[in-house]
Structure formats: C-alpha cells, structure tokens
Amino acid sequence: MADTHTSATERLREITVNGRATRTTAATLAGLVVEQGFAEGRVATAVNGDFVAERARAAARLRDGDNVEILSVRQGG
C-alpha cells in the first residue's frame, strides 16, 4: 500500500529565489537558506520585498509564488 500522507514540510513549493524560478520542499525561509547552500555564511534575506532578520527566518513560512532574495554579506572595499 502506498503512503499517501505528505506533510506540510515535504510539499513542493514554486517560488522565485534571486530572480530564478525554483521548486523547494523548504517550508521556511531558514530551511531555504540551508537548501540553497548559504548555511555557512552571513546573508541578508527578504521575502516579497520585506527584509527578514535572521532570528525570524525559522518562523517565516514560504508560500507558492513568494519572491525571495538571499544576498551574501561581504566586507572590504
């Protein structure tokens, strides 16, 4: 018998990340940051044009159609 249960965290979402159409199973912005390979560095994030602080990323739920920006923070000049 096939398992027909799909949790909310396993659902595929269609979003835009840094201008690129993306499919993700990440349910939150924090999960997306990890999934996109930015877990090791400092980044700034925004969803639909609104800045999301690092401490708020785990609570920032992603929805189909969201437009996400993940920007690396660089130092120097």
Image (tube, rainbow, N blue to C red):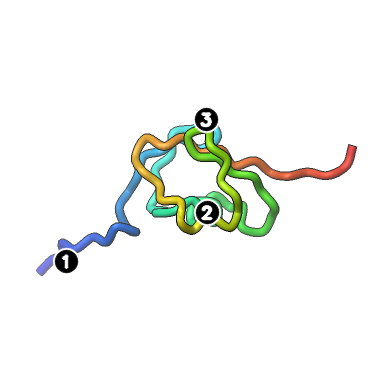
Q: Secondary structure at mark 3?
A: loop
Indicate the amino acid at tag 1: Asp
Percent of width and height locating residue 60: 46, 51
Rendering coords of residue 73 (x, y %): 73, 44
Mark 1 and mark 3 residues within 8 Å of each other at the beta carbon: no
| Camera-side mark, 1 or 3 | 3
| Amino acid carrying mark 2 in the image | Arg
Q: Which residue is mark 3?
A: 19
- Work out whether mark 1 precedes mark 2 in sequence or the reverse, and give the earlier one: 1
Q: Comparing marks 3 and 2, which lies closer to the viewer?
A: 2
At horizontal 57% and vertical 40% (from top left) the residue drawn is 51
In-image side of 26 versus 55 (left or right) = left
Kind of residue indicated by mark 3: Gly
**Direction top: furthest residue:** 19
In the rendering, at what x and y percent does residue 9 appear? Answer: 34, 59
Label 1: which residue? 3
Most foreground residue, 47 or 71: 47
Q: Is residue 30 above or below residue 45?
A: below
Q: Residues within 10 Å of mark 2 (few under 14, many from 20)?
A: some
Residue positioned 43% across, 39% down in the render: 22
Of the 4 image quadrants, the one containing the C terminus is top right
Q: Residue at x 41, y 37 (%)?
A: 66
Q: Label 2 belongs to which residue?
A: 57
Q: CA distance from mark 3 to mark 2?
A: 19 Å
Residue occupying the point 19% across, 63% down? 5
Q: In x, y percent, where is residue 40?
A: 67, 59
Please tell me how many numbered marks the rendered image carries.
3
Left or right of residue 64, residue 69 in this image: right
Q: CA distance from mark 1 to mark 2?
A: 31 Å
